[in-house]
Image (cartoon, rainbow, N blue to C red):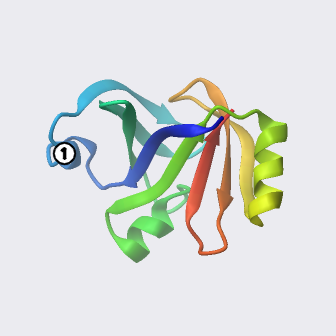
């Protein structure tokens, strides 16, 4: 059964953005060379908030930041293996965008997909 793991936000400055959320508890941060971004994970009750600060125009999330500004980027689920995620994508007619790739922030593989309404969904494998 899949469950919500985190909501990801693209931001310019992690620390100042995190200050706007009440009750966040810092877990860890990493520099992700593949995504070309600084990533920070905060506990927010039973789920997490991920803050993503792209380092420049070649970062995965740079275009989103430039086009839409700071804010929500994706929702992430866990509790399914790759075969189950593939089944979910077929059933919901989602487009697989990237992955599986290694996510240093979680030390696990992840997959990214897009809904028919163009929302980004991440799956922790």
Determine the residue positioned at 33% across, 69% down.
69
Q: Quadrant of the N terminus?
A: top right
Residue 66 drawn at (x, y percent): 40, 72
Residue, x 61% and y 42% (percent of image)?
34
User: Based on the displayed image, in which of its 4 quarters is residue 10 positioned?
Assistant: bottom left
Q: Callout 1: few (<14), some (14-19), or many (20+) C-alpha neighbours within 10 Å?
A: few
> From the viewer's perspective, is residue 45 above or below residue 63?
above
Q: Quadrant of the C terminus?
A: top right
Q: Position of residue 27 (x, y in %)?
A: 34, 23
Residue occupying image coordinates x 38% and y 35%: 48
Up-down relation of residue 110 to residue 52 (above or below): above
Q: Is residue 33 left or right of residue 28?
A: right
> Can residue 37 be spotted in the picture?
yes
State the SS at label 1.
Answer: loop
Q: Quadrant of residue 95?
A: bottom right
Residue 52 in the image, given as x and y percentages of width and height: 40, 47
Q: Is residue 54 visible?
A: no
Residue carrying label 1? 21
Residue 24 in percent (x, y) is at: 22, 34
């Amino acid at each position: 059964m899949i469950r919500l793991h985190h909501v990801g936000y693209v931001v310019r400055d992690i620390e100042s953005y995190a200050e706007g959320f009440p009750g966040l508890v810092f877990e860890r941060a990493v520099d992700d060379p593949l995504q070309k971004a600084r990533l920070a994970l905060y506990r927010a009750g039973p789920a997490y908030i991920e803050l993503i600060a792209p380092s420049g125009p070649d970062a995965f999330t740079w275009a989103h930041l430039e086009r839409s500004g700071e804010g929500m980027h994706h929702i992430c689920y866990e509790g399914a293996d790759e075969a189950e995620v593939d089944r979910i994508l077929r059933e919901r007619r989602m487009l697989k965008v990237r992955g599986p790739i290694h996510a240093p922030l979680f030390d696990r593989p992840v997959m990214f997909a897009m809904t028919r309404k163009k929302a980004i969904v991440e799956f922790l494998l």
